[in-house]
Amino acid sequence: MKKLFGVITAMTTPFTQDGKVDTAALEAQTEFLIQKGVQCLYPCGTTGEMYLMSAGDRELVAETVVKKAAGRVTVFIHCGAMTEEETIRLAQHALGRKYSREVILKWLKAFYRRFFTQQFKRSCLPDGPKVGSLALSPRGDWRMPSDGVDALWMKELETL
């Protein structure tokens, strides 16, 4: 696994007028970012549109960026989704089907367990609603109660 370093850019996804992924614009954006010195591209990451895209469109974005980057920079593909099933599908695609569904599910369970049990270390903010700015910094806004438990999440994974 490559170490992430340097400038890591969350890429926006360009769309055509009819709502399809604009692969030509995506290729141009990829080349532009590489030429400007970005060391790691993060397609479908943290810009929000990925939750409105189909898994097929997200896979197309990943394939387009990886092909255009052609090994010149690291491409870190966002695989988080609204369902665990789609997350597993996207992870398998991003990893070139190198890992089985069972292996990805094992590590998704480990992530949930660690996320819920290490919440205090991730964020020392007080529990409660956010009032004020609309910033999306993971250090300042995306909150979860420190007494949250993983039971519901783990139960859902057991059904997959």
Image (cartoon, grey):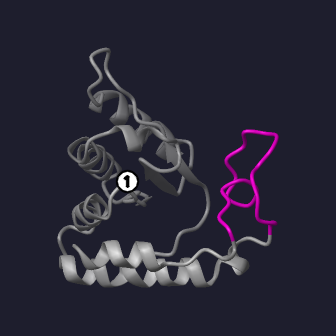
Amino acid type, label 1: Met
Report the residue at 35% width, 77% height from top.
155
Position of the C terminus, as image quadrant, is bottom left
Report the residue at 23% width, 74% height from top.
159
Residue 40 coordinates in the image, percent (x, y): 50, 57
Report the residue at 28% width, 62% height from top.
94
Query: Which residues make up the magenta segment?
Result: 125-145
Number of marks in the rendered image: 1
Q: Is residue 123 left or right of residue 80?
A: right
Residue 105 coordinates in the image, percent (x, y): 29, 78
Q: Nearer the viewer, residue 19 or 1?
A: 19
Is residue 11 visible to the viewer in this orientation of the structure? yes
Is residue 99 visible to the viewer in this orientation of the structure? no
Q: Residue 139: say if magenta.
A: yes
- Residue of label 1: 82
Residue 101 coordinates in the image, percent (x, y): 19, 76
Position of the N terminus, as image quadrant, is bottom left
Q: Nearer the viewer, residue 71 or 138?
A: 138
| Looking at the image, residue 83 lies above or below residue 35 | below
Secondary structure under tag 1 reads: loop
Residue 132 coordinates in the image, percent (x, y): 82, 40
